Amino acid sequence: MRYDKLPQAERLFDVIGMIDDSIIAEAQAPYTTPSRAIGRKQFRSLIALACAFAIITVGIFGGALLSGLLGTPIADKNDHAAPESSAPSQSVPLDQLLSGASESDAISRVPPQAIDFFDGNVKILWQDLGENEICVLPVPYQGQAQRIRNLLKQQTDSIPPDHTDPLSCQVWIAFEDGTVVSPYLKDSPGNIGYADLFAYAPEVEPSPDLIRLIDELLPPS
Amino acid sequence: MEDHQIVDLYWARSEHAIAQTEQKYGRMLTGISAALVPTYQDAEECVSDTYLAAWNSMPEERPTYLGAFLSKIVRRISIDKFRALRANKRGGAQTLIDELTDCIPSDCDVQAEYDNRRLAGALDTFLRDLDEEKRYIFVRRYYYSDSILEIARRMRVSEGKVKTVLFRTRNALRKYLEEEGFAL
Protein backbone atom coordinates (compact mmCIF):
# COMPACT_ATOMS: atom_id res chain seq x y z
CA MET A 1 0.00 0.00 0.00
CA ARG A 2 1.31 3.45 -0.93
CA TYR A 3 0.60 5.64 2.08
CA ASP A 4 1.36 8.81 0.11
CA LYS A 5 -1.56 7.96 -2.19
CA LEU A 6 -4.11 7.43 0.58
CA PRO A 7 -5.81 10.85 0.35
CA GLN A 8 -6.27 10.44 -3.40
CA ALA A 9 -7.58 6.93 -2.88
CA GLU A 10 -10.08 8.28 -0.38
CA ARG A 11 -11.25 10.84 -2.91
CA LEU A 12 -11.63 8.12 -5.55
CA PHE A 13 -13.59 6.01 -3.08
CA ASP A 14 -15.89 9.00 -2.47
CA VAL A 15 -16.35 9.70 -6.16
CA ILE A 16 -17.23 6.08 -6.88
CA GLY A 17 -20.34 6.93 -4.88
CA MET A 18 -21.29 9.39 -7.64
CA ILE A 19 -21.38 6.95 -10.58
CA ASP A 20 -24.51 6.60 -12.67
CA ASP A 21 -27.55 5.05 -11.00
CA SER A 22 -28.03 2.55 -13.83
CA ILE A 23 -24.57 1.07 -13.20
CA ILE A 24 -25.34 0.78 -9.50
CA ALA A 25 -28.73 -0.78 -10.19
CA GLU A 26 -27.18 -3.32 -12.58
CA ALA A 27 -24.87 -4.57 -9.85
CA GLN A 28 -27.66 -4.60 -7.30
CA ALA A 29 -29.36 -7.52 -9.06
CA PRO A 30 -28.08 -11.11 -8.80
CA TYR A 31 -25.42 -11.85 -11.39
CA THR A 32 -26.43 -13.89 -14.41
CA THR A 33 -23.53 -15.39 -16.35
CA PRO A 34 -23.73 -14.67 -20.06
CA SER A 35 -23.60 -18.41 -20.82
CA ARG A 36 -27.00 -18.83 -19.14
CA ALA A 37 -28.61 -16.48 -21.60
CA ILE A 38 -29.80 -18.24 -24.77
CA GLY A 39 -30.06 -16.76 -28.22
CA ARG A 40 -33.31 -16.12 -30.08
CA LYS A 41 -32.87 -19.07 -32.42
CA GLN A 42 -32.23 -21.44 -29.55
CA PHE A 43 -35.20 -19.97 -27.66
CA ARG A 44 -37.53 -20.54 -30.63
CA SER A 45 -36.26 -24.10 -31.00
CA LEU A 46 -36.91 -24.73 -27.31
CA ILE A 47 -40.45 -23.34 -27.58
CA ALA A 48 -41.16 -25.50 -30.62
CA LEU A 49 -39.82 -28.57 -28.85
CA ALA A 50 -41.88 -27.80 -25.74
CA CYS A 51 -45.05 -27.37 -27.83
CA ALA A 52 -44.46 -30.64 -29.65
CA PHE A 53 -43.89 -32.45 -26.36
CA ALA A 54 -47.04 -30.95 -24.86
CA ILE A 55 -49.15 -31.97 -27.89
CA ILE A 56 -47.84 -35.53 -27.79
CA THR A 57 -48.38 -35.81 -24.03
CA VAL A 58 -51.94 -34.49 -24.20
CA GLY A 59 -52.63 -36.75 -27.14
CA ILE A 60 -51.50 -39.85 -25.30
CA PHE A 61 -52.93 -39.18 -21.88
CA GLY A 62 -55.79 -36.82 -22.59
CA GLY A 63 -57.71 -39.39 -24.59
CA ALA A 64 -57.15 -42.02 -21.93
CA LEU A 65 -58.47 -39.74 -19.22
CA LEU A 66 -61.62 -38.82 -21.12
CA SER A 67 -62.39 -42.44 -21.85
CA GLY A 68 -61.99 -43.26 -18.15
CA LEU A 69 -59.20 -45.78 -18.75
CA LEU A 70 -57.28 -44.31 -15.80
CA GLY A 71 -60.37 -44.71 -13.61
CA THR A 72 -60.42 -41.12 -12.36
CA PRO A 73 -63.79 -39.62 -13.21
CA ILE A 74 -64.11 -35.85 -13.52
CA ALA A 75 -66.13 -34.65 -10.49
CA ASP A 76 -69.64 -33.28 -11.15
CA LYS A 77 -69.91 -29.70 -10.02
CA ASN A 78 -73.31 -30.42 -8.47
CA ASP A 79 -72.12 -33.58 -6.77
CA HIS A 80 -72.20 -32.69 -3.07
CA ALA A 81 -70.73 -36.09 -2.28
CA ALA A 82 -67.54 -35.22 -4.15
CA PRO A 83 -64.49 -36.61 -2.37
CA GLU A 84 -62.56 -34.37 -0.02
CA SER A 85 -59.37 -32.77 -1.18
CA SER A 86 -56.54 -35.29 -1.34
CA ALA A 87 -54.24 -32.78 0.40
CA PRO A 88 -55.87 -32.05 3.77
CA SER A 89 -52.72 -30.19 4.86
CA GLN A 90 -53.52 -27.39 2.41
CA SER A 91 -55.13 -25.50 5.28
CA VAL A 92 -52.13 -26.00 7.59
CA PRO A 93 -49.84 -22.97 7.76
CA LEU A 94 -46.42 -23.58 6.29
CA ASP A 95 -44.52 -23.18 9.55
CA GLN A 96 -46.70 -25.75 11.29
CA LEU A 97 -46.46 -28.12 8.32
CA LEU A 98 -42.67 -28.04 8.43
CA SER A 99 -42.42 -28.13 12.22
CA GLY A 100 -44.59 -31.22 12.17
CA ALA A 101 -42.18 -32.88 9.76
CA SER A 102 -39.06 -32.01 11.76
CA GLU A 103 -39.14 -35.25 13.76
CA SER A 104 -39.28 -37.47 10.69
CA ASP A 105 -36.23 -39.72 10.29
CA ALA A 106 -36.25 -38.91 6.60
CA ILE A 107 -35.45 -35.22 7.27
CA SER A 108 -31.78 -34.30 7.70
CA ARG A 109 -30.89 -32.05 10.60
CA VAL A 110 -27.55 -30.26 10.46
CA PRO A 111 -25.84 -27.40 12.26
CA PRO A 112 -26.16 -24.12 10.32
CA GLN A 113 -22.45 -24.01 9.46
CA ALA A 114 -22.69 -27.42 7.78
CA ILE A 115 -25.05 -26.22 5.06
CA ASP A 116 -23.44 -25.99 1.65
CA PHE A 117 -25.17 -23.22 -0.31
CA PHE A 118 -23.14 -23.88 -3.43
CA ASP A 119 -23.62 -27.60 -4.04
CA GLY A 120 -25.91 -26.81 -6.96
CA ASN A 121 -29.02 -28.10 -5.17
CA VAL A 122 -32.19 -26.26 -4.24
CA LYS A 123 -33.17 -26.81 -0.61
CA ILE A 124 -35.98 -25.91 1.74
CA LEU A 125 -34.55 -25.10 5.15
CA TRP A 126 -36.29 -24.50 8.44
CA GLN A 127 -35.30 -23.98 12.04
CA ASP A 128 -37.77 -24.74 14.80
CA LEU A 129 -38.15 -22.16 17.56
CA GLY A 130 -35.46 -22.64 20.17
CA GLU A 131 -33.52 -25.18 18.12
CA ASN A 132 -30.05 -24.69 16.67
CA GLU A 133 -30.15 -27.39 14.01
CA ILE A 134 -31.52 -26.72 10.57
CA CYS A 135 -33.88 -29.18 8.89
CA VAL A 136 -33.03 -29.70 5.23
CA LEU A 137 -35.46 -30.82 2.53
CA PRO A 138 -33.94 -31.12 -0.95
CA VAL A 139 -35.96 -30.10 -4.00
CA PRO A 140 -34.94 -32.86 -6.39
CA TYR A 141 -36.24 -31.60 -9.74
CA GLN A 142 -35.52 -28.41 -11.63
CA GLY A 143 -39.17 -28.08 -12.59
CA GLN A 144 -40.18 -28.04 -8.94
CA ALA A 145 -37.50 -25.46 -8.15
CA GLN A 146 -38.73 -23.25 -10.98
CA ARG A 147 -42.32 -23.56 -9.74
CA ILE A 148 -41.15 -22.48 -6.30
CA ARG A 149 -39.39 -19.46 -7.79
CA ASN A 150 -42.51 -18.49 -9.72
CA LEU A 151 -44.79 -18.93 -6.71
CA LEU A 152 -42.51 -16.82 -4.53
CA LYS A 153 -42.84 -13.95 -6.99
CA GLN A 154 -46.62 -14.10 -6.87
CA GLN A 155 -47.20 -13.92 -3.14
CA THR A 156 -49.36 -10.99 -2.17
CA ASP A 157 -51.23 -11.86 1.06
CA SER A 158 -49.66 -9.42 3.48
CA ILE A 159 -49.50 -10.23 7.15
CA PRO A 160 -51.02 -7.31 9.10
CA PRO A 161 -48.40 -5.31 11.02
CA ASP A 162 -50.18 -6.07 14.31
CA HIS A 163 -50.09 -9.84 13.72
CA THR A 164 -48.52 -11.27 16.84
CA ASP A 165 -48.75 -15.05 16.55
CA PRO A 166 -45.16 -16.28 16.47
CA LEU A 167 -44.13 -18.72 13.76
CA SER A 168 -43.27 -22.27 14.83
CA CYS A 169 -40.13 -22.06 12.73
CA GLN A 170 -38.19 -19.77 10.45
CA VAL A 171 -38.23 -20.95 6.84
CA TRP A 172 -35.83 -20.28 3.97
CA ILE A 173 -35.39 -21.56 0.46
CA ALA A 174 -31.83 -21.78 -0.84
CA PHE A 175 -31.33 -21.82 -4.60
CA GLU A 176 -28.45 -23.26 -6.56
CA ASP A 177 -26.77 -19.89 -7.06
CA GLY A 178 -26.42 -19.27 -3.33
CA THR A 179 -29.39 -16.91 -3.06
CA VAL A 180 -31.55 -17.44 -0.01
CA VAL A 181 -35.08 -16.15 0.30
CA SER A 182 -37.89 -16.71 2.74
CA PRO A 183 -41.45 -17.55 1.66
CA TYR A 184 -42.52 -15.22 4.46
CA LEU A 185 -40.90 -12.19 2.82
CA LYS A 186 -41.99 -10.28 -0.26
CA ASP A 187 -40.05 -10.73 -3.47
CA SER A 188 -37.60 -7.83 -3.55
CA PRO A 189 -33.83 -7.32 -3.85
CA GLY A 190 -33.78 -6.16 -0.24
CA ASN A 191 -35.06 -9.53 0.92
CA ILE A 192 -32.43 -11.72 -0.72
CA GLY A 193 -29.58 -13.19 1.28
CA TYR A 194 -26.47 -14.89 0.00
CA ALA A 195 -25.26 -18.07 1.60
CA ASP A 196 -26.65 -17.15 4.98
CA LEU A 197 -29.77 -17.82 7.02
CA PHE A 198 -31.12 -14.56 8.34
CA ALA A 199 -33.64 -13.61 10.97
CA TYR A 200 -36.71 -11.81 9.66
CA ALA A 201 -40.15 -10.57 10.60
CA PRO A 202 -42.81 -12.18 8.35
CA GLU A 203 -44.44 -9.91 5.75
CA VAL A 204 -46.61 -12.27 3.68
CA GLU A 205 -48.49 -15.51 4.12
CA PRO A 206 -47.04 -18.27 1.94
CA SER A 207 -49.58 -19.02 -0.75
CA PRO A 208 -51.67 -22.25 -0.64
CA ASP A 209 -50.04 -23.37 -3.91
CA LEU A 210 -46.57 -23.02 -2.42
CA ILE A 211 -47.59 -24.87 0.73
CA ARG A 212 -49.12 -27.62 -1.39
CA LEU A 213 -45.94 -27.97 -3.43
CA ILE A 214 -43.77 -28.16 -0.31
CA ASP A 215 -46.16 -30.68 1.23
CA GLU A 216 -45.68 -32.89 -1.84
CA LEU A 217 -41.93 -32.81 -1.27
CA LEU A 218 -42.14 -33.86 2.38
CA PRO A 219 -41.66 -37.55 3.12
CA PRO A 220 -44.86 -39.37 4.05
CA SER A 221 -45.51 -39.34 7.78
CA MET B 1 -44.17 -2.42 -4.16
CA GLU B 2 -42.53 -0.96 -7.27
CA ASP B 3 -39.99 1.84 -6.91
CA HIS B 4 -42.18 4.46 -8.56
CA GLN B 5 -45.02 3.63 -6.19
CA ILE B 6 -42.79 4.13 -3.17
CA VAL B 7 -41.52 7.41 -4.63
CA ASP B 8 -45.15 8.48 -5.08
CA LEU B 9 -45.66 7.88 -1.36
CA TYR B 10 -42.79 10.24 -0.56
CA TRP B 11 -44.21 12.86 -2.88
CA ALA B 12 -47.60 12.47 -1.23
CA ARG B 13 -45.86 12.82 2.19
CA SER B 14 -47.43 9.52 3.18
CA GLU B 15 -46.46 7.97 6.50
CA HIS B 16 -46.11 4.61 4.73
CA ALA B 17 -43.22 5.77 2.55
CA ILE B 18 -40.47 4.94 5.04
CA ALA B 19 -42.07 1.66 6.07
CA GLN B 20 -42.25 0.51 2.45
CA THR B 21 -38.68 1.65 1.88
CA GLU B 22 -37.50 -0.28 4.89
CA GLN B 23 -39.37 -3.37 3.76
CA LYS B 24 -37.89 -3.33 0.28
CA TYR B 25 -34.39 -2.00 0.86
CA GLY B 26 -33.71 -2.21 4.58
CA ARG B 27 -31.48 -5.26 4.43
CA MET B 28 -29.53 -4.01 1.45
CA LEU B 29 -28.89 -0.62 3.06
CA THR B 30 -27.86 -2.19 6.33
CA GLY B 31 -25.49 -4.49 4.48
CA ILE B 32 -23.83 -1.57 2.68
CA SER B 33 -23.46 0.45 5.86
CA ALA B 34 -22.27 -2.48 7.98
CA ALA B 35 -19.36 -2.98 5.59
CA LEU B 36 -18.20 0.60 6.11
CA VAL B 37 -18.72 1.36 9.80
CA PRO B 38 -17.29 -0.48 12.80
CA THR B 39 -20.44 -1.70 14.55
CA TYR B 40 -23.92 -2.87 13.66
CA GLN B 41 -25.32 -0.12 15.85
CA ASP B 42 -23.49 2.47 13.78
CA ALA B 43 -24.93 0.87 10.66
CA GLU B 44 -28.46 1.05 12.04
CA GLU B 45 -27.95 4.74 12.82
CA CYS B 46 -26.71 5.37 9.30
CA VAL B 47 -29.71 3.59 7.82
CA SER B 48 -32.10 5.62 9.98
CA ASP B 49 -30.36 8.80 8.83
CA THR B 50 -30.75 7.58 5.27
CA TYR B 51 -34.53 7.31 5.63
CA LEU B 52 -34.61 10.84 7.02
CA ALA B 53 -32.46 12.12 4.17
CA ALA B 54 -34.69 10.37 1.65
CA TRP B 55 -37.78 11.92 3.26
CA ASN B 56 -36.20 15.36 3.11
CA SER B 57 -35.08 15.00 -0.49
CA MET B 58 -38.46 14.01 -1.88
CA PRO B 59 -40.35 15.80 -3.30
CA GLU B 60 -37.83 17.61 -5.47
CA GLU B 61 -36.01 14.40 -6.28
CA ARG B 62 -37.83 11.71 -8.25
CA PRO B 63 -35.28 8.88 -8.65
CA THR B 64 -35.79 6.26 -11.34
CA TYR B 65 -33.74 3.67 -9.48
CA LEU B 66 -34.78 4.06 -5.87
CA GLY B 67 -32.35 1.38 -4.65
CA ALA B 68 -29.41 3.14 -6.25
CA PHE B 69 -30.59 6.52 -4.91
CA LEU B 70 -30.87 5.21 -1.35
CA SER B 71 -27.61 3.27 -1.55
CA LYS B 72 -25.78 6.46 -2.52
CA ILE B 73 -27.18 8.23 0.52
CA VAL B 74 -26.35 5.44 2.97
CA ARG B 75 -22.89 5.06 1.49
CA ARG B 76 -22.22 8.76 1.86
CA ILE B 77 -23.52 8.86 5.44
CA SER B 78 -21.59 5.71 6.38
CA ILE B 79 -18.30 7.01 4.97
CA ASP B 80 -18.76 10.28 6.86
CA LYS B 81 -19.50 8.33 10.03
CA PHE B 82 -16.43 6.17 9.50
CA ARG B 83 -14.28 9.29 9.10
CA ALA B 84 -15.77 10.92 12.17
CA LEU B 85 -15.14 7.83 14.25
CA ARG B 86 -11.63 7.54 12.87
CA ALA B 87 -10.93 11.18 13.68
CA ASN B 88 -12.17 10.70 17.22
CA LYS B 89 -9.94 7.69 17.60
CA ARG B 90 -6.85 9.42 16.30
CA GLY B 91 -7.35 12.71 18.03
CA GLY B 92 -4.28 14.92 17.89
CA ALA B 93 -3.38 16.08 14.40
CA GLN B 94 -6.51 14.68 12.77
CA THR B 95 -8.76 16.77 14.99
CA LEU B 96 -6.75 19.89 14.18
CA ILE B 97 -6.85 19.15 10.47
CA ASP B 98 -10.60 18.68 10.59
CA GLU B 99 -10.98 22.07 12.33
CA LEU B 100 -8.90 23.69 9.62
CA THR B 101 -11.33 22.58 6.94
CA ASP B 102 -13.38 25.58 8.10
CA CYS B 103 -10.62 27.79 6.70
CA ILE B 104 -10.75 26.45 3.21
CA PRO B 105 -12.57 29.00 0.99
CA SER B 106 -15.89 27.87 -0.44
CA ASP B 107 -14.63 28.48 -3.99
CA CYS B 108 -12.46 25.46 -3.39
CA ASP B 109 -15.61 23.50 -2.53
CA VAL B 110 -17.18 24.47 -5.81
CA GLN B 111 -14.04 23.59 -7.73
CA ALA B 112 -13.70 20.30 -5.88
CA GLU B 113 -17.32 19.48 -6.59
CA TYR B 114 -16.85 20.25 -10.28
CA ASP B 115 -13.68 18.13 -10.42
CA ASN B 116 -15.43 15.29 -8.65
CA ARG B 117 -18.31 15.35 -11.10
CA ARG B 118 -15.88 15.24 -14.01
CA LEU B 119 -14.13 12.33 -12.39
CA ALA B 120 -17.43 10.56 -11.80
CA GLY B 121 -18.29 11.03 -15.46
CA ALA B 122 -14.96 9.52 -16.44
CA LEU B 123 -15.59 6.60 -14.12
CA ASP B 124 -18.98 6.05 -15.79
CA THR B 125 -17.30 5.90 -19.18
CA PHE B 126 -14.59 3.56 -17.92
CA LEU B 127 -17.06 1.22 -16.26
CA ARG B 128 -19.37 1.10 -19.30
CA ASP B 129 -16.43 0.09 -21.46
CA LEU B 130 -15.69 -2.88 -19.21
CA ASP B 131 -17.36 -6.21 -19.87
CA GLU B 132 -20.28 -7.07 -17.64
CA GLU B 133 -18.36 -9.43 -15.37
CA LYS B 134 -15.52 -7.00 -14.62
CA ARG B 135 -17.94 -4.11 -14.08
CA TYR B 136 -20.07 -6.17 -11.73
CA ILE B 137 -17.06 -7.24 -9.66
CA PHE B 138 -15.66 -3.69 -9.49
CA VAL B 139 -18.97 -2.11 -8.45
CA ARG B 140 -19.76 -4.82 -5.90
CA ARG B 141 -16.32 -4.33 -4.33
CA TYR B 142 -15.87 -0.58 -4.37
CA TYR B 143 -19.42 0.70 -4.29
CA TYR B 144 -21.28 -1.99 -2.31
CA SER B 145 -18.13 -2.86 -0.28
CA ASP B 146 -18.63 -6.60 -0.65
CA SER B 147 -15.80 -8.82 0.55
CA ILE B 148 -13.85 -10.90 -2.00
CA LEU B 149 -15.53 -14.01 -0.64
CA GLU B 150 -19.02 -12.53 -0.98
CA ILE B 151 -18.35 -11.52 -4.57
CA ALA B 152 -16.91 -14.96 -5.39
CA ARG B 153 -20.02 -16.61 -3.97
CA ARG B 154 -22.40 -14.26 -5.77
CA MET B 155 -20.77 -15.02 -9.07
CA ARG B 156 -19.89 -18.65 -8.39
CA VAL B 157 -16.25 -18.11 -9.21
CA SER B 158 -13.08 -18.54 -7.20
CA GLU B 159 -11.74 -15.86 -4.89
CA GLY B 160 -8.55 -15.95 -6.93
CA LYS B 161 -10.44 -14.94 -10.03
CA VAL B 162 -12.12 -12.04 -8.21
CA LYS B 163 -8.77 -10.82 -6.92
CA THR B 164 -7.21 -11.07 -10.36
CA VAL B 165 -10.06 -9.19 -12.02
CA LEU B 166 -9.89 -6.43 -9.39
CA PHE B 167 -6.13 -6.11 -9.71
CA ARG B 168 -6.27 -5.82 -13.48
CA THR B 169 -9.24 -3.46 -13.42
CA ARG B 170 -7.54 -1.16 -10.91
CA ASN B 171 -4.46 -1.03 -13.16
CA ALA B 172 -6.63 -0.32 -16.18
CA LEU B 173 -8.41 2.46 -14.28
CA ARG B 174 -5.12 4.04 -13.27
CA LYS B 175 -3.93 4.01 -16.87
CA TYR B 176 -7.26 5.42 -18.05
CA LEU B 177 -7.23 8.27 -15.52
CA GLU B 178 -3.65 9.13 -16.45
CA GLU B 179 -4.56 9.25 -20.14
CA GLU B 180 -7.60 11.43 -19.39
CA GLY B 181 -5.40 13.83 -17.46
CA PHE B 182 -6.93 13.36 -14.03
CA ALA B 183 -4.62 14.43 -11.24
CA LEU B 184 -6.15 12.96 -8.11
Image: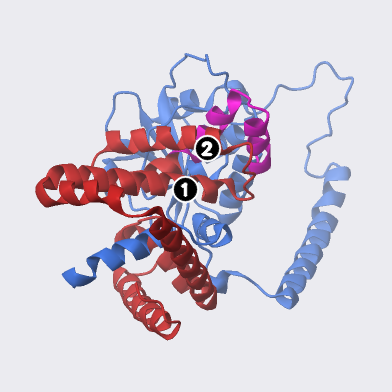
Q: Residue at x 75, y 77 (%)?
A: A41
Figure colour of chain A? blue
From the image, tell me which residue sits under label 1.
B71
Depth check, front residue: A201 or B20? B20
Q: Position of residue A102 (x, y in %)?
A: 38, 30
Sequence-wise first label, 1 or 2: 2
Q: Position of residue B151 (x, y in %)?
A: 37, 61
What residue is shown with label 2? Answer: B54
Question: What SS does tag 1 mark?
Answer: helix
The chain painted red is B
Write down the region rendered in magenta.
B1-26
Q: Mark 2 belongs to which subunit? A: B
Q: Residue at x 36, y 79 (%)?
A: B174
Mark 2 secondary-structure assignment: helix
**Inter-mark Cα distance, 1 to 2:** 11 Å
- Residue A126 position by quadrant: top left
Q: Which part of the image, by quadrant, shows the C terminus of chain B?
A: bottom left
Frontmost residue, A88 versus A17? A17
The disc at residue A212 is none
* Quarter assignment of residue A71: top right
Around disc 1, counting alpha carbons within 10 Å, would you say few (fewer than 14), some (14 to 19), or many (20 or more)?
Answer: many
* Front tag of 1 and 2: 2
